[in-house]
Image: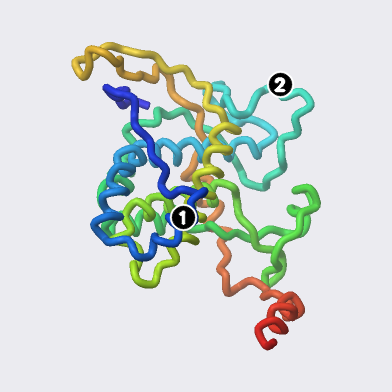
Amino acid sequence: MMSSLDEKPPQYSPLISQEDPQDEESIPSCSHAHIQHELTKWRRRFYILLVSSIATVLCLVGATSYKLHTSTGFSCPILPTNHGSVEIPYSPAPVKYVNKYLVGDPDTPKFMGEPRPEMDQAWHELLDGTLIRYSSSELLKANNATSVAHKDGGYVGGLGVSHSLHCIKRIKQYLHPEYYYNHEDQDWKELYSHVDHCLESLRQEILCSADVNVYTLKWTKHSRFKPTVKVPQPHACVDWAALHEWMKDRAARLDEMVGPPESLYEDQDLKAGA
């Protein structure tokens, strides 16, 4: 939010045409130089958006709480104090709020710039606790939900914020194919479809959370034509550190889940053997 508006309107071009199947089929044969050229144009646009999206989706988790807990009395814009007939979904997550500006995060350098081991480690730590355990009573309160069973009892699931962070990570990796993907073996059509899904998911979540915090404009030496955006007051954000600790305490692994019944794949096995 603190960056200046661009001098000229950005010129957008599609990553890959969904209406031209020939474009999708040609992806695996694209040269490294061509892919690098096309994705370089997107990197600068996404660097700031990636960081701001993380902060936005963390605040979105607040919509899962019935009551706003804050010592400052600052109301979170995504959780109205008078929501009328709108039902706030149940979540066992112990959500609390803190006031913060969405700039100057000490972790920002870890997530920006070119891919490197430090960045990969930062993402690994951020996504720790993606899968968590739920009790049957918790799922009952969550609209009588069902999920995959845990081998030691209870069930395995997650929070919406984990899916959003996963999507941001996937988009980041898509911007650097030379670092994250094997160009000979990669299914580019599937990868594009996944990234496209992630962008659409984030679009809907941002509209759902609809950050209504005020921003203002200020003339600076940066430009004679476009003023700089300023945010005069802090956001009310979910205390991510506290929430993440709770998620890690409940963490589950894929190998701890009860596997699928074999009957689920009988039709596929019959077709494969035909």
179 above or below 44? below
- In the rendered image, residue 24, in percent from the top left (x then y), is placed at 45, 57
Q: Quadrant of the C terminus?
A: bottom right
158 above or below 199? below
Q: Residue at x 76, y 59 (%)?
A: 146
Along the viewing direction, whichever of 89 and 106 lies nearer the viewer: 89
Q: Which class describes the residues within 10 Å of circle 1: few (<14), some (14-19), or many (20+)?
A: some
Is label 1 in a helix, a strand or a loop? helix
265 above or below 44? below
Total number of numbered discs in the rendering: 2
Residue beneath label 1, please?
192
Q: Quadrant of residue 187?
A: bottom left
Q: Residue at x 76, y 54 (%)?
A: 145
Q: Residue at x 31, y 55 (%)?
A: 176
Q: Is residue 107 left or right of residue 100?
A: left
Q: Amino acid at mark 1?
A: Tyr
Q: Quadrant of the N terminus?
A: top left
Name the mark nearer the viewer: 2 or 1.
1
Residue 82 image label: 2
Q: Is residue 257 left or right of residue 227?
A: right
Residue 161 image label: none
Q: Residue furthest bottom?
A: 273
Is label 2 in a helix, a strand or a loop? loop
247 above or below 2? below
Q: Earlier in the sequence, mark 2 or mark 1?
A: 2
Q: Amino acid at mark 2?
A: Asn
Q: Quadrant of residue 148?
A: bottom right
- In the rendered image, residue 15, in percent from the top left (x then y), is placed at 41, 47
- In the rendered image, residue 6, in percent from the top left (x then y), is placed at 30, 25
**Residues marked 2 and 1 touching at CB (< 8 Å):** no
Q: Residue furthest left?
A: 221
Q: Which class describes the residues within 10 Å of circle 2: few (<14), some (14-19), or many (20+)?
A: few
